Image: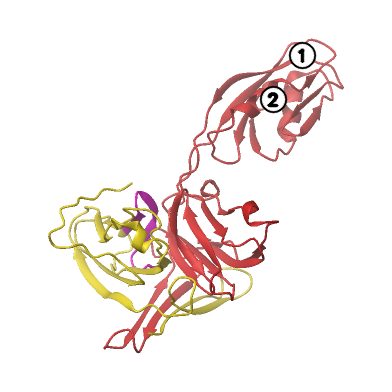
């Protein structure tokens, strides 16, 4: 069990008639326990830039689908700019949290509520031959033989940039699950049917599918200027 | 002009391979300037005995006067029961849970109307919460104002 502490100090001698000197220390633990958190993204640092103001894009800092919802996750973000007018706008999903101006930092909990991932099942059927190919998500499988279960196993063994696979040995079906929650995956499923190249009557039809839903709490930050701006970020999570 | 400083230190000798020793400090300024914020609610302490969602910082009716102005929020769950937490929301968006002893410090710029910050205790057995707002501009309603608010 790791021991991680976070301390905040707020101080001012002239904001109020009474001096402000608040200091709070928290030991970061997993949700509902006294066990220390054990995972962290590590402190990262990145400079954003774009060709023009019109080309500024938000940076997806943390995807909720990569983490467990409703845990004691903590997010740290800092704008390292030294130009007072430059800021990053921080959003959770579509809700604007606030702006981090030059030198500003924030430390907040994050519930990481994800959506659901699109899934579909491909069933390999009819007559396949060694050398037949099936392409999906930019990845091509070339059949080593004509056995449908072996072809399914080959498909399962490949690495897809946007999908993961589930395969049960000896079966001729593969379940594809999107890596990220999204409600806009239908078009990709269609292409899964259209890239078959077989010498025989082999098929790789989608036998079932379910639409996903978008994530509800991805954290994004958008720079205010297209010139270089640098941020630091760290996620401490369960 | 007031000078208010916010500092954060995160340390751990065993969370990652290298010892973690993060330390950062900034002064809280008005938006886009180096002029310090001059207004605050002070640090309040409340003892909540219901699981009702409450507004810590009230909805802003007129965004025009406040839009883009800088505010900073501090919230701390002073519970000592590790299972108790407070759920923090901005408008209808859940930010996260503050478990016993946890605190948060985040900007709040209120670019949209009716953006409130709310808190929901996980238990009705009593939970002490500390919170404060440091701000540049905030509308105060006239006592005769009959407007009603709802999240957008």
A58 to B81, vertically: above or below: above
Overall secondary structure of the magenta stretch? strand
Q: Which residues are magenta?
A: B86-104
Observer-nearest residue: B122 or B75? Answer: B75
The residue at 80%/15% (across/down) is A128
Quarter location, residue A34: bottom left
Q: Are marks 2 and 1 on the same chain?
A: yes
The structure residue drawn at horizontal position 44% and vertical position 80%, both measured from the top left corner, is B35
Q: Is residue A32 visible?
A: no
x, y (%) of residue A150? 76, 24
Chain identity for the colour yellow used in the image: B
Q: x, y (%) of residue A173? A: 65, 22
Structural crowding at the residue carrying mark 2, measured as other residues with C-alpha within 10 Å and reported as few (<14), some (14–19) or many (≥20):
few
Which mark identifies residue A110? none
Mark 1, residues whose alpha carbon is within 10 Å: few (<14), some, or many (≥20)?
A: some
Would you name the residue on which mark 1 appears?
Answer: A202
């Amino acid at each position: 069990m790791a021991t991680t502490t976070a301390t905040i100090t707020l101080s001012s001698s002239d904001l109020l008639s009474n001096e402000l000197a608040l200091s709070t220390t928290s030991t970061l633990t997993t949700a509902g326990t006294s066990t220390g958190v054990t995972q962290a993204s590590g402190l990262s640092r990145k400079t954003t830039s774009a060709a023009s103001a019109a080309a500024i894009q938000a940076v997806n800092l943390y995807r909720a689908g990569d983490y467990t919802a409703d845990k004691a996750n903590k997010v740290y973000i800092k704008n390292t700019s030294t130009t007072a007018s430059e800021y990053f706008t921080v959003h959770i999903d579509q809700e604007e949290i606030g702006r981090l101006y030059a030198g500003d930092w924030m430390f907040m909990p994050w519930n990481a509520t994800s959506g659901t991932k699109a899934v579909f099942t491909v069933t390999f059927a009819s007559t396949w031959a060694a050398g037949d190919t099936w392409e999906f998500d930019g990845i091509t499988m070339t059949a080593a033989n004509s056995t449908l279960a072996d072809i399914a196993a080959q498909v399962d063994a490949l690495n897809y940039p946007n999908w993961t696979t589930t395969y049960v040995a000896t079966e001729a079906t593969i379940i594809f699950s999107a890596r990220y929650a999204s409600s806009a995956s239908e078009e990709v499923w269609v292409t899964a049917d259209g890239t078959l190249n077989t010498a025989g009557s082999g098929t790789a039809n989608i036998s079932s599918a379910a639409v996903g839903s978008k994530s509800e709490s991805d954290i994004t930050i958008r720079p205010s200027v297209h010139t270089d701006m640098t941020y630091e970020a760290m996620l401490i999570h369960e | 002009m007031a000078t208010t400083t916010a500092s954060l230190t995160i340390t751990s000798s065993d969370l990652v391979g290298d010892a973690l020793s993060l330390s950062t400090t900034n002064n809280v300024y008005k938006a886009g300037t180096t002029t310090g914020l001059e207004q605050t609610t002070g640090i309040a302490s409340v003892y909540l005995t219901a699981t009702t969602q409450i507004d810590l910082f009230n909805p802003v009716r007129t965004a025009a006067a406040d839009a883009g102005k800088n505010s900073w929020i501090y919230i701390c769950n002073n519970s000592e029961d590790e299972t108790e937490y407070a759920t923090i929301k901005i408008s209808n968006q859940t930010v996260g849970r503050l478990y016993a002893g946890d605190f948060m410090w985040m900007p709040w710029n209120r670019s949209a109307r009716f953006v409130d910050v709310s808190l929901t205790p996980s238990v009705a057995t009593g939970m002490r919460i500390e919170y404060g707002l440091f701000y540049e501009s905030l509308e105060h309603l006239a006592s005769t104002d009959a407007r009603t608010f709802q999240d957008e």
